[in-house]
Image (spheres, rainbow, N blue to C red):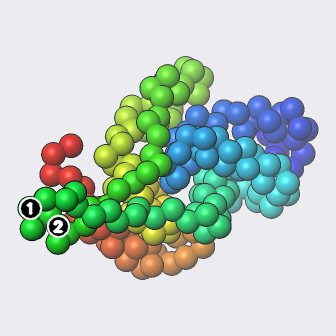
């Protein structure tokens, strides 16, 4: 079906097939189910508004991920969320008092019911990732420490399994820039991940 020639109903049906995985993607980026829902709606509005820009060079799915990722990056730029440093409790060991812990205030658990497997006609290699994946709050809390672009690169590369070239195309950057961002993101992630999960 042509995106440009599709009527509103047909276009809406096309978008709805991707709602579940886009919601999970936005949730990973933002750490908030409420914000993820809002950003999926924003993604659909942008897709409708700019449907004439879809050239068929990539899949509809990749095009929607580009829109969703950019919507999330815009949201994080306008409303940055950074973990705030909190002091150790009074009377804590000197080693703890010297190193403030980062506290994340906003991650919300992702309801398991929203991760139900896709309908059989939607099942395919791309949907398998979303259907099998569990969303750990520890992962989500750690990923919030990353700058937004590094967060996007880490999610697209390590969670969704996109190639560096695909991520570079989606983010409008170069492959070396994506590889560098991924290396920095992984280092930060490894440093911040609790030893026991």
Residue 128 at least partly seen: no
Counting from the top left corner in percent of width and height, residue 173 is at: 55, 76
Disc 1 residue crowd, few under 14, some 14–19, many 20+, Cα 10 Å: few
Q: Residue at x 90, y 45 (%)?
A: 5
Q: Residue furthest top?
A: 120
Relative to 30, is 57 on the left or the right?
right
Counting from the top left corner in percent of width and height, residue 118 is at: 54, 25
Using the rendered view, name the quadrant where residue 34 is placed: top right
Relative to 85, is 64 on the left or the right?
right
Whether tag 1 and tag 2 are in contact, CB under 8 A, the answer is yes
Relative to 2, is 160 on the left or the right?
left
Q: Which residue is mark 2?
A: 97
Measured along the vertical axis of the image, is residue 37 above or below residue 167?
above
Q: Residue at x 45, y 69 (%)?
A: 147
**Can you tell which mark lies on residue 93?**
1
User: As rendered, which of 127 and 44 lies closer to the eye?
Assistant: 44
Residue 156 at least partly seen: yes
Q: Residue furthest front?
A: 90
Element marked by disc 2: helix
Element marked by disc 1: loop
User: As rendered, which of 127 and 144 lies closer to the eye?
Assistant: 144
What is the tally of numbered marks visible in this picture?
A: 2
Q: Residue at x 61, y 63 (%)?
A: 79
Counting from the top left corner in percent of width and height, residue 181 is at: 40, 73
Relative to 6, is 15 on the left or the right?
left
């Amino acid at each position: 079906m042509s995106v440009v020639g599709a009527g509103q109903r047909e276009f809406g049906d096309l978008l709805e097939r991707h709602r579940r995985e886009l919601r999970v993607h936005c949730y990973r980026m933002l750490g908030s189910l409420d914000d993820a829902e809002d950003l999926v709606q924003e993604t659909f509005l942008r897709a409708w508004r700019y449907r004439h820009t879809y050239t068929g060079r990539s899949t509809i799915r990749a095009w929607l991920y580009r829109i969703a990722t950019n919507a999330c990056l815009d949201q994080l730029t306008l409303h940055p969320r950074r973990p705030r440093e909190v002091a150790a409790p009074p009377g804590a060991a000197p080693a703890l008092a010297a190193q403030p812990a980062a506290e994340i205030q906003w991650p919300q658990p992702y309801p398991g019911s929203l991760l139900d497997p896709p309908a059989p006609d939607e099942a395919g290699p791309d949907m398998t990732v979303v259907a099998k994946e569990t969303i750990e709050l520890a992962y989500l809390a750690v990923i919030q420490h990353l700058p937004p672009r590094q967060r996007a690169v880490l999610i697209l590369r390590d969670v969704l399994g996109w190639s560096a070239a695909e991520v570079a195309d989606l983010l409008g950057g170069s492959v070396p820039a994506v590889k560098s961002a991924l290396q920095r993101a992984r280092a930060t992630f490894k440093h911040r991940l609790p030893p026991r999960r």
